Amino acid sequence: MQVSAFRIFFQTGAWLVIAFLVLPILVVLPISFTDTSYIGLPKEALSLQHYANYFTDPDWLGATWTSVWVGLVVATCASVLGTAFAIGCWFLSDRAAMVARWVLITPILVPPVVQSLGFYRFWVKLGLIDTHFGVILAHTLLALPYVSISVFAALSNLDRNLPRAARSLGASVMQTVWAVVVPAARPGIATGFIFAFIVSFDEIVGVLFITVRNVQTLPKMIWEGIQDNIDPTIAAVATLLIALTLIATAIGVLRRS
């Protein structure tokens, strides 16, 4: 009887947490079809005007394209650098590797506002304020820990005797890395690439600090829409992003099944 009560308690708690996370998302869906010029539920009929506004407004499309290509560049750079760092640490002693890992994950531990303030002060000196390169560099630094952690996890099961065996058979260090270590790290590299893209695509605090007018990303566009006139197009954009996320998740689940 006591076990059943605990089960009901934890199941109820789990459903409440799910509702807390999902219900705000579900509210966005009807708002995206509102027939009003402000954020609110539809009054007279469902309307696609805000979806049409998103797909016809060059500002929205330009901000989306900027976020996509910046995210891809950041994911590529972070994957290359993070993988190289993780593989290098894998060859080090356990103590040195642990210290290097803690140094690299520092950006995750520091509050975003503190990070952004540091980027701003340093980027001013380098002349990178309000430039795409400045945004890419800042996002790459933020995404590096996620790639490295993913690659570390992928390499945790790799037998250290395999590289030694490759070296004893005459393979060079680079041949050993490419033929033995990198194939074992590929799942972590792919996961890290996805995480790096998401980090860059969603990042807003740093962008607000280091950009003015020349660089306009989608999160910044959404933020400005909320601050200025609460454009219902924001709800349409959010619904599209949710739909893309669900589709990508479903494809991933189907490929594994």
Image (spheres, rainbow, N blue to C red):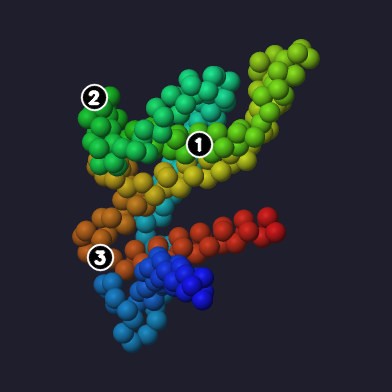
Q: Residue at x 47, y 26 (%)?
A: 98
**For marks 3 and 2 on the same chain, the one whose residue lies earlier in the sequence:** 2
Point out the frontmost of discs 3 and 1.
1
Q: Amino acid at mark 2?
A: Lys
Question: Circle 3 sits in a helix, a strand or a loop, which is it?
Answer: loop
| Residue beneath disc 3 | 230
Residue 229 visible? The answer is yes
Q: Position of residue 243 (x, y in %)?
A: 50, 64
**For marks 1 and 2 on the same chain, the one whose residue lies earlier in the sequence:** 2
Q: Residue at x 21, y 60 (%)?
A: 228
> Callout 2: 10 Å neighbours few (<14), some, many (20+)?
few
Q: Which mark is residue 73?
A: none
Q: Amino acid at mark 1?
A: Ile
> Callout 1: 10 Å neighbours few (<14), some, many (20+)?
many
Towards the viewer: 92 or 239: 92
| Residue beneath disc 1 | 149
